[in-house]
Image: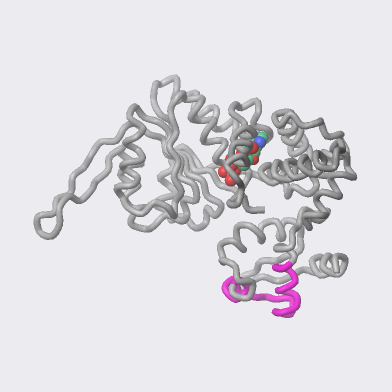
Amino acid sequence: MSTSQETPLEHSLDSLLRPKTWDDYIGQEKVKKNLDVLISAAKQRGQMPEHILLYGPAGLGKTTLAYIIGSILGVPIQTASGPMIERVGDIASLASTLENGGVLFIDEIHRLKKNIEESLYPIMESGTVSVMLGKGPAAQSVTFDLPPIVIIAATTQAGKLSTPLRTRFSGGTLKLAPYSDGEIAQILKRSAAVLETSPPDDEAVREIAKRSRNTPRIANYLLKRVRDYAQVHEKDISADIVKQALTERDIDAYGLTNEDRSVLETINTVFNGGPVGIKALATTLSEDPETIEEVYEPFLIQVGFLDRTPRGRSITKKGVSYLRSVR
Ligand code: ADP
């Protein structure tokens, strides 16, 4: 379900589907209300809002919020990803491209290197950045003023942020919650209209929503795959077509994939049901521990198939009966 192998066309479809206004941004009412007050107040004072931290699982709409905030403020946005920022100078140069100010969006901020994190503090507090010029005894620290920027950072793991960094998001930490089936259905109907596909009937929308893991990005991904399938088979999008299309892709009625099932199967058979530490599990599955923690685990816990305890991960009774039912 990764989007990393998508073609440029898929990316342009994704930017087409990305809501550009509050009205199109479905759900997350509390987050929207809080952001609206923060942004409107700052706008009335002719200032940038204070820095904001958005927290929640992947695909829930954090990047989309950053773009909407930029557009309400009427300022440009620069984006960066925590692990891609190599040097202090990278942040300074990103911020400097926002000549008259703007939004600096930093995704996956929990993966920022420690020295880069520390260099972010003066940027967040006083809008200045210090860089070392020269080498050895002649090296000098020079401080620059940056254009007025608001840093909007996103993380899937707020617990991994150090306290000094977390507390510098003085505009607040806003947590995004999973979407209800009804909200996902609204998102799917809007997306079908944007894609100009034949409108799926209510039952078909419900079947896609059920498999979406309550996540808009996954709902849109499934809709695009169902649309392809319906088109190739010259059919309208009905509940049956949804089931056929997604079963062919090994996505079951819970929205679980082969990868999710391998996680459960490995804990169940290799580790006798657990508990097993994340590193041992990752090695056995040849996966990155972060992928297990961020991609597979949250939903397996949400549906009650996996337990996370201080001693490690265990499969639940419900998880064992699920595996029996799909064997
Ligand atoms: P994140 O940054 O949290 O990983 P994104 O903001 O990239 O998630 O959202 C993924 C996609 O899901 C967006 O491109 C958009 O099409 C859709 N999406 C996310 N949130 C919403 C929402 N509240 N309403 C409608 N569509 C949404």
Task: Answer with left or right where residue 234 lies relative to residue 264.
Answer: right
Task: Answer with left or right where residue 297 lies relative to residue 161.
Answer: right
User: In this figure, which colouring scheme has been used for the structure?
Assistant: one colour
- Regarding residue 28, the answer to whether it shows in the image is no
At 86% from the left and 50% from the top, the residue drawn is 244
Task: Answer with left or right where residue 202 lies relative to residue 297.
Answer: right
Residue 48 in magenta stretch: no
Q: Is the stretch drawn in magenta largely helix, strand or loop?
A: helix
Q: Nearer the viewer, residue 165 or 97?
A: 97
Q: Residue furthest left?
A: 138
Q: Which residues are magenta?
A: 262-282
Residue 239: percent from the left, percent from the top?
Answer: 88, 42
At 15% from the left and 53% from the top, the residue drawn is 134
- The C terminus lies in quadrant: bottom right
Q: Nearer the viewer, residue 44 or 290?
A: 290
Q: Residue furthest right?
A: 240
Q: Which image quarter: residue 196?
A: top right
Q: Residue furthest top?
A: 44
At 74% from the left and 80% from the top, the residue drawn is 272
Q: Nearer the viewer, residue 252 or 159?
A: 252
Residue 142 position (above or below residue 99) = below
- Regarding residue 238, the answer to whether it shows in the image is yes
Residue 270 in magenta stretch: yes
Q: Quadrant of ligand 1?
A: top right
Q: Nearer the viewer, residue 89 or 275?
A: 89
